[in-house]
Image (cartoon, rainbow, N blue to C red):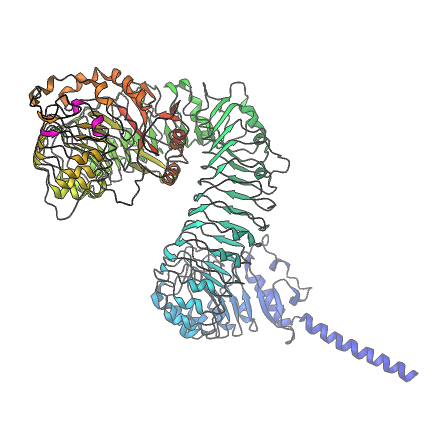
């Protein structure tokens, strides 16, 4: 018994000794020399104790192997093998630290995310011969990587990445990349992000593949690498992670990436990749993350995803991938993020997306997807969905997002979605942002429960919503943005309701049918807004916004506000106002003092009744519009000081006098300068054309400017629109105008030019509109051309000049802009000049044309509108047969010349022709039967020629009156009284033409099957000298013409403006496409809403085609002979 007890005690003692040794070994009791080195290191390092979590806690009373960031070897009796000092705010003391370099057993050193202020990487690191893992990423080191690093042959992982490059970024020049890695053959992980490796040039791939056969992780993001991707990289079969983002590789993606069987991550964003992407890479079963974003020249399609794919992230945004998304996307069972935004994808969005149960983030914006939005029932983790800027159709049901309790962001902006908005959408518990603007949602918005709402952004603008604004909107306490503009909401809104939305910073109620009541509201309790839009809200006075200290954008346009602009308005936002729009009101003056805030970049006061002192804009102005007011003064001579940074400056439609100030030549950023329709005199400053090289639009039309056009157009000329019409400018067209190779519109009509045909423009291939009418241009219509020119020309008007010679068939065949391919559909875009692209601002071109015997000013020039007017010249010879090639031509006027020969039968090919005038020439022969096929023809004048024979019979041609055929003694048949076979001559002759009294009612009785409603017009008989006689009949003509064609019209400041339904035979799909560009106009027209625009400058922050001023008339739609329409605006002067 005693022996047994002694044995038990002995074994217990032995077990205790063994256990003590084990515990001591596991704890890695720190050796004294190691402790001393660590304490010395802490004393050497310069760090901020307030941000330190490791060094600051090192304590001698505690075993150093238990210090934060320290790891000891369990088998070597307490030797330090790992030191993790990342995020310790260390800024110095390491460069000559003998303590650090004395820790010779270190296998891992991590100094990442410190602040070493661009000091070089310490050379003493080479003493750490056992080091396998070295992480110096984002530690603030800079300069050349020391060659000593290349001797650390034990390294397995090296990370010198730097996401925050300092004054002296890390670089590999000497040694270069090849020298650095030559001896590091055991390296498996290499991270050199933002290290300058440009010295290695394009053989960096060979340097890696020849030295690092075991490499698995490679990250060389933003290293200034160049392409191509060397084929030797295919030897690195073990690669699992490849990150080469942010290098200008300018190459194709090699197929061999698809053979890497261990590949898990491939990111190549912003690499200037090009060509087709190998689809086999999508099939790599181990691939988890693929990022090819921001490679706009990289193309590709996706035909199939393999079953059991490992992909969790697919990012293809801002690339040229196209085609449809396959149903097999459902095979991506692990997918959590997919971003296909800003690509060229089309077709339906697969309904199989509903099977992706791990999906969190989905962005398909800026594509061409069509069809309905699929359901996402099973994607319970979905938190972000962006399908904006596609062509999605259909409606939203209450079940579309049912059960998605994590959904925080829904963006469906700029689609074709319709129907009502389900109330359940507003009630999603996690929803923060709901953006549904620029769709076709209609009907009333019903109230909903707001008790658990987290909504901070609600944007329903630019739809067709109606009824009163739901009270629920004013109960969303967390709401930051409320945008309801450009709908049909009605009723009265009291601004005091907004006071409950304490977090609101952006309120947009403009362009509805609302009446906003701000008269009884104390706005001192109003939330501090940064953006306020109350346009078209029937305001009769300024709301008191004096206490708004954060307001930067204010839009009170299109209201009924009278009187002076108050002086306090310049002080709102504590002087931080950046955009102010007071256009389309009844304002008459500006209250003094005018303390224009220095931050005011956009100032829009146009279309008021302002007069008196010229308000000098802010020196920071980029957009200034004072057009359509009653200013009568001279333009201040120092105006250029205040428009130095301006991109847009318009004083059009005022009464400004004097000369154009020379100081404007300092406004070198100007893109649009419009001083048209004033009383300016003097000449065009020489420096204006020479200095303003960014100028895209110069409009000085309808003034009293004289002299010549300076021959100073810069070689860097950017002009797209040049309008000098209706002045007293003479001389020649300057040769330097040839420098303006981007010209689209040139209008020098109604001046005193005495020059030949402007052949200097022969190389302006972008030219669309050329107007030379009513000058003294002379000579033949030909230039020496080596190639076809003016392939985009759609309007050419050289009427009332002294041009002579023949019409050359070669030039007519080069005008491709007047030809329509057989299978092409005309697009209803408008000529315009875009500026301030981020805000979708644009300048609308105008031009006057003679059509149907009347001079019209087109305020919006459709790119499908085409016209040729060569009338009132001395042209001779025959009409070329090639005129029949201009298959999209709408207006052809060759009247009052000396043309001879027969009317070519090819005119019958002009199926779009709406107006044909060949009168007062010397044409002979019979009227071609082919004219009977011109079913769109609504105006025809063949009078005063030498035509003979029977007028062709046909439904269209016989709707015209006898005046269309008068003065041709040899013609017979209806509608003439002369029967065929009768020899009774017509008593009228060409010589009596000027004495004719036109009967406008009888002329327009024959319009019949025309292109649709005629434009608003200013009667102008065929040549300039008869204008006065026609003006007297204008009112009578309007009363007879408009009821027949369904016009709504008004007189405004001596001008008549109207909207016509222009028939173009487009399909419904094309109409949909047009509505995307011209939503507000298109919507109005489709609902019988006909709008009168009083300006040619249309501005709206979100939609370029929206015009803030639209005087609307509701009536039955105009009748027309075609199935579709688009808007075209005209003005009579």
Query: Which residues, given as a range, are shown in magenta?
Result: 947-964
| Front one among 193 and 126 | 193
**Image x and y of residue 39, in percent:** 61, 65
Tell me: residue 56, above or below residue 397.
below
Check if residue 82 falls in the magenta segment.
no
* In this rendering, position of residue 967 left or right of residue 914: left
Task: Pick the quarter of the image with the C terminus.
Answer: top left
Q: Residue lying furthest bottom in this view?
A: 3
Tell me: residue 849, above or below residue 793.
above
Q: How many marks?
A: 0
Check if residue 953 falls in the magenta segment.
yes
> Image quarter for residue 672?
top left
| Front one among 20 and 292 | 292
Tell me: residue 990, above or below residue 426.
above
**Image x and y of residue 207, in percent:** 39, 71
**Image x and y of residue 267, in percent:** 45, 60
């Amino acid at each position: 018994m005693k022996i047994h007890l002694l044995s038990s005690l002995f074994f217990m003692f032995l077990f205790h000794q063994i256990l003590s040794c084990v515990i001591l070994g596991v704890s890695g009791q720190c050796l004294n020399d190691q402790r001393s080195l660590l304490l010395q290191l802490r004393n050497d390092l310069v760090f901020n104790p307030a941000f330190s979590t490791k060094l600051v806690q090192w304590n001698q009373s505690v075993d150093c192997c238990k210090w934060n960031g320290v790891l000891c070897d369990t088998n070597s009796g307490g030797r330090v093998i790992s030191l993790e000092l990342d995020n310790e705010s260390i800024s110095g003391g390491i460069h000559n630290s003998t303590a650090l370099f004395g820790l010779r057993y270190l296998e891992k050193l991590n100094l990442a995310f410190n602040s070493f202020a661009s000091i070089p990487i310490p050379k003493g690191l080479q003493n750490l011969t056992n080091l396998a893992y070295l992480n110096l990423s984002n530690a603030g080191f800079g300069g050349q990587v020391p060659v000593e690093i290349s001797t650390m042959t034990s390294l397995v992982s090296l990370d010198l990445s730097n996401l925050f490059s300092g004054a002296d970024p890390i670089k590999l020049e000497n040694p270069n990349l090849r020298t650095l890695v030559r001896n590091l053959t055991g390296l498996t992980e290499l991270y050199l992000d933002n290290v300058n490796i440009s010295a290695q040039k394009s053989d960096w791939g060979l340097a890696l593949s020849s030295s690092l056969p075991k490499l698995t992780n490679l990250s060389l993001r933003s290293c200034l690498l160049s392409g191509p991707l060397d084929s030797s990289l295919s030897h690195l079969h073990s690669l699992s992670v490849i990150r080469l983002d942010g290098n200008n590789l300018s190459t194709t993606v090699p197929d061999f990436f698809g053979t890497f069987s261990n590949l898990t991550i491939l990111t190549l964003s912003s690499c200037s990749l090009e060509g087709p992407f190998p689809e086999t890479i999508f099939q790599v079963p181990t691939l988890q993350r693929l990022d090819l974003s921001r490679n706009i020249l990289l193309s590709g399609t996706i035909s199939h995803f393999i079953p059991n794919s490992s992909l969790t992230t697919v990012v293809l945004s801002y690339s040229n991938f196209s085609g449809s998304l396959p149903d097999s996307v459902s095979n991506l069972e692990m997918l959590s993020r997919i971003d296909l935004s800003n690509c060229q994808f089309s077709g339906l969005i697969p309904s199989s997306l509903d099977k992706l149960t791990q999906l969190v983030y989905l962005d398909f914006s800026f594509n061409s997807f069509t069809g309905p939005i699929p359901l996402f029932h099973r994607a319970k983790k979905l938190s972000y969905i962006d399908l904006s800027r596609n062509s999605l159709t259909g409606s939203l049901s209450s079940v579309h997002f049912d059960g998605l309790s994590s959904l925080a962001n829904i963006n469906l902006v700029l689609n074709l979605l319709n129907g009502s908005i389900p109330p359940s959408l507003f009630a999603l518990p996690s929803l923060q942002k709901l953006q549904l603007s620029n769709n076709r949602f209609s009907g009333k918005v019903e109230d909903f429960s707001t008790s658990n709402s987290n909504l901070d952004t609600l944007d329903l603008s630019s739809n067709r919503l109606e009824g009163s604004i739901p009270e629920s909107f004013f109960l969303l306490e967390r709401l930051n943005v409320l945008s309801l503009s450009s709908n049909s909401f009605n009723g009265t809104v009291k601004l005091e309701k907004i006071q409950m939305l304490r977090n609101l910073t952006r309120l947009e109620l403009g362009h509805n049918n609302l009446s906003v009541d701000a008269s009884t509201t104390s706005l001192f309790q109003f939330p501090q807004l940064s953006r306020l839009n109350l346009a078209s809200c029937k305001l009769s006075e300024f709301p008191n916004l004096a206490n708004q200290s954060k307001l930067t954008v204010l839009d009170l346009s299109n209201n009924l506000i009278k009187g002076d602009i108050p002086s306090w308005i310049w002080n709102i936002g504590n002087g931080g106002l950046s955009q102010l729009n007071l256009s389309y009101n009844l304002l008459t003056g500006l209250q003094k003092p005018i303390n224009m805030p220095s931050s005011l970049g956009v100032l829009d006061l146009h279309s008021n009744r302002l007069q008196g002192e010229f308000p000098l804009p802010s020196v920071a102005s980029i957009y200034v519009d004072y057009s359509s007011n009653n200013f009568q003064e001279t333009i201040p001579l120092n105006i250029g000081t205040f428009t130095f940074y301006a991109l847009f400056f318009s004083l059009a439609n005022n009464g400004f006098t004097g000369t154009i100030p020379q100081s404007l030549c300092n406004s070198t950023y100007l893109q649009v300068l419009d001083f048209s329709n004033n009383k300016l005199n003097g000449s065009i400053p020489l420096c204006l054309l020479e200095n303003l090289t960014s100028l895209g639009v110069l409009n000085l039309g309808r003034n009293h400017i004289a002299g010549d056009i300076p021959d100073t157009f810069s070689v860097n000329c950017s002009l797209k629109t040049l309008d000098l019409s209706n002045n007293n400018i003479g001389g020649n067209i300057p040769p330097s105008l040839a420098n303006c190779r981007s010209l689209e519109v040139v209008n020098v009509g109604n001046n005193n030019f005495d020059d030949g045909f402007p052949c200097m423009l022969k190389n302006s291939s972008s030219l669309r509109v050329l107007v030379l009418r009513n000058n003294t241009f002379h000579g033949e219509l030909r230039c020496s051309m080596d190639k076809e020119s003016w392939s985009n020309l759609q309007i050419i008007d050289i009427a009332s000049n002294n041009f002579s010679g023949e019409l050359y068939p070669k030039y007519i065949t080069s005008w491709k802009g007047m030809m329509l391919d057989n299978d092409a559909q005309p697009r209803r875009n408008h000529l315009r000049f875009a500026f301030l692209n981020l805000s979708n601002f644009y300048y609308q071109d105008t031009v006057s044309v003679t059509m149907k015997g009347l001079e019209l000013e087109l305020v919006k020039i459709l790119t499908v509108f085409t016209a040729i007017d060569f009338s009132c010249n001395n042209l001779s010879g025959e009409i070329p047969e090639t005129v029949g090639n201009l298959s999209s031509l709408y207006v052809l006027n060759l009247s009052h010349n000396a043309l001879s020969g027969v009317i070519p039968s090819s005119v019958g090919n002009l199926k779009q022709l709406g107006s044909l005038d060949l009168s007062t020439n010397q044409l002979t022969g019979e009227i071609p039967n082919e004219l009977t096929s011109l079913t769109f023809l609504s105006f025809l004048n063949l009078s005063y020629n030498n035509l003979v024979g029977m007028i062709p019979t046909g439904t269209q041609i016989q709707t015209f009156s006898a005046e269309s055929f008068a003065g041709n003694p040899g013609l017979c048949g209806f509608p003439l009284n002369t029967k065929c076979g009768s020899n009774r001559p017509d008593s009228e002759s060409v010589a009596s033409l000027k004495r004719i009294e036109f009967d406008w009612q009888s002329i327009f009785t024959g319009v019949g099957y025309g292109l649709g409603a005629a434009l608003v017009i200013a009667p102008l008989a065929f040549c300039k000298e008869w204008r006065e006689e026609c003006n007297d009949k204008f009112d009578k003509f309007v009363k007879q013409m408009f009821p027949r064609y369904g016009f709504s019209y008004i007189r405004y400041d001596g001008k008549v403006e109207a909207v016509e339904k222009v028939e173009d035979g487009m399909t419904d799909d094309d109409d949909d496409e047009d509505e995307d560009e011209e939503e507000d106009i298109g919507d109005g027209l489709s609902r019988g809403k006909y709008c009168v625009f009083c300006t040619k400058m249309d501005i709206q922050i979100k939609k370029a085609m929206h015009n803030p001023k639209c005087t609307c008339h509701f009536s039955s739609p105009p009748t027309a002979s075609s199935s579709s329409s688009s808007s075209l605006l005209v003005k009579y002067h």
